[in-house]
Amino acid sequence: MTKFQRRVRLFIAKSIQIRYVGLILIGMFLTAVITGYTVYTTILLMLGERLAVVYPQGLLMDIIREANMVLVIRLIPLGLLVVLIGLVLSNRIAGPIYRIQKFIIKISRGKYNVKLKLRKKDELKDVASSLNSLASRLDRQRGRALEEVETALDAAGELGEDLKEGRSDKDKILKQARHLRKSLDKLKEGL
């Protein structure tokens, strides 16, 4: 079994990852806005009333503006960190989807003897297992079908030779025809 290396590229399936990160950002942003608004307005109202007595009105507004600037400056790197975390986490879904897509392309081209392998922490392992079972079953069916084709071709060849050489042993020809029919029926059932 080969050992998987870490993915270096952050974008494996770009459209899926961008939507996933977008959903994370929207969820984070809505949560942050609601929580921030609640905390900020509560603190501002409580401190504003008490500080208004101590500080002149103009100085209090400068303190509030400065606090707002510090808040915005701190939110920018936090937002970038969330985007980076979202990309790394989306890789666990996008990478397997990318591998599954490549695997299905191989299967559609008739390469049934391939195995789909995912990394240890990847998602969709149950889907990969089901696809591996499907590929294995298709490979076995194809093998049986090829055996039946070979048997049918051999029987047809013998029948043709007997007829060509004028061997008209009716029972033998009938037996070969039945054998050919049986092989073709098995082949039909396997498809």
Image (cartoon, helix red, strand yellow):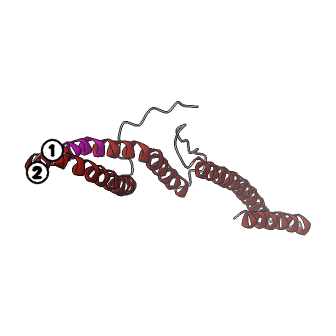
Q: Secondary structure at mark 1?
A: helix
Q: Secondary structure at mark 2?
A: helix
**Left or right of 88 in this view: 149:** right
For the point 59% across and 31% down, the residue is 1
Could you classify mark 2 by the number of other residues whose Cα lies within 10 Å: few (under 14), some (14-19), or many (20 or more)?
Answer: few
* Residue found at the very far right of the displayed protein: 171
Residue 44 position in % (x across, y down): 25, 51
Residue 137 position in % (x across, y down): 69, 53
Residue, disc 2: 57
Magenta residue span: 69-79
Asked whether the viewer can see residue 167, the reply is: no
For the point 27% across and 53% down, the residue is 45
Asked whether the viewer can see residue 65, the reply is: yes
Q: Nearer the viewer, residue 165 or 101?
A: 101
Q: Main secondary structure of the magenta part?
A: helix
* Residue found at the very far front of the displayed protein: 53
Residue 42 position in % (x across, y down): 32, 53
Q: Is residue 7 above or below residue 50?
A: above
Foreground label between 2 and 1:
2
Between the residue at mark 2 and the residue at mark 1, the CA separation in whole angstroms equals 10 Å
The quadrant holding residue 107 is bottom right
